[in-house]
Amino acid sequence: MSKNSGRRTLATRRRRYTGEPEWAAEYGLRSHGPKSSTGQPFSSLGLDNQSEPQQAMRASLALFLLNSPAPRTVVESSDDRELHRGDVSRLMWDHVVYSPRHDELAVFSDMPGHLVQKVRNFPGIRSLAKDDANNALVLQHVPTGGRLSFRYFNWRRPASRNRVFVMPLHFDYMPSTTLLDEREQTMIAAIPAIHEDAGTLLAGLTTRLWLANRSEGWAVSGLIRDTLGRDQGDQPPYLYLWGRDREWVLRWGGRNSVPAGDVARALTHPTVGIRGATTRRTADQVCVSLGQATLHLERIQPPSRWMLEPGGVA
């Protein structure tokens, strides 16, 4: 088997779970990360072959993506909820595909400019380049050095890779300075200490937020947009991620929320899971462990009319 055909085979296997365009899956296999004795990257088809700045950015992004208004009964007492105030979790409501690369997290969408507007409140994110040749808006996260890009993809015409797309003008108005304003400094200061193993788990969680495999019967679906149609009633959706050092908890719920087992499966799957991650079940949660860190996964369905934290800021 030639090197190119072998890569195409791996790319096909990867996109069964990610839903990426074929060329993007192939690009994502490129890695400068560690290799196994067979010469293949240690990660699951390139999903974790990231640079250190990229991993740090993905772990930080998880905390802002996965914190929205939440029932006060699920919020930890140590959480001052500064992470929620940026409302970056609005990104979880859009149909996107994540395409992780060694030095970038590429997000494919048919409305990249719309997503850029939503990520403006991710503290430290800055415009870096408008790549017209590849229909991409590239941003950099100043605190970590990681890169995030929003790339145009026409889902109705997947073969039209180079279709001309007019980039939105408001991208030019995004800040590009490396200085952090007072609000950003406050939000970054609210991020708890993250153990190295926990950082790998949180970064891997971000990468896998939109993984799915219908034939295997599971989907992460952004936690609250179940593509398999498993309706849970009429509860409003919420996302909540908090912890410190080695111990973290992810709670979510709502009408279209996915089972905790599906999220655990994505993180520990033999093909697309995090290498070395294991799972165990308790009476009320699924726990995923990696090295010294543990992520507790809990889908909690509060009453249809749940209350926010005091003051209405959850």
Image (cartoon, rainbow, N blue to C red):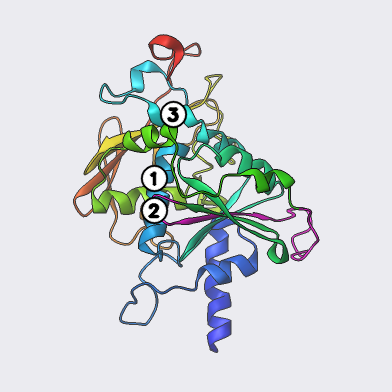
Vertical placement of 8 versus 58: above or below?
below
Q: Residue at x 46, y 53 (%)?
A: 207
Alpha-carbon neighbours of circle 1 within 10 Å: few (<14), some, or many (≥20)? many
Judge whether residue 148 is colored magenta.
yes
SS under mark 1? helix
SS under mark 2? loop
Whether residue 273 is visible, yes or no, is no
Vertical placement of 200 versus 133: above or below?
above
From the image, tell me which residue sits under label 1.
60
From the image, tell me which residue sits under label 2.
144
Stretch in magenta: 142-166
Labels 3 and 2: the sequence-earlier one: 3
Instruction: Assess whether mark 2 and mark 1 are in contact (beta carbons under 8 angstroms).
Output: yes
Where residue 112 sits: x, y (%)?
Answer: 67, 48
Instruction: Assess whether mark 1 and mark 3 are in contact (beta carbons under 8 angstroms).
Output: no
Labels 3 and 1: the sequence-earlier one: 1
Q: Nearer the viewer, residue 296 or 232?
A: 296
Q: Residue at x 72, y 62 (%)?
A: 132
In the picture, the quarter occupied by the C terminus is top left
The amino acid at mark 3 is His
The residues tagged by marks 1 and 2 sit, at their Cα atoms, a distance apart of 9 Å
From the image, tell me which residue sits under label 3.
84
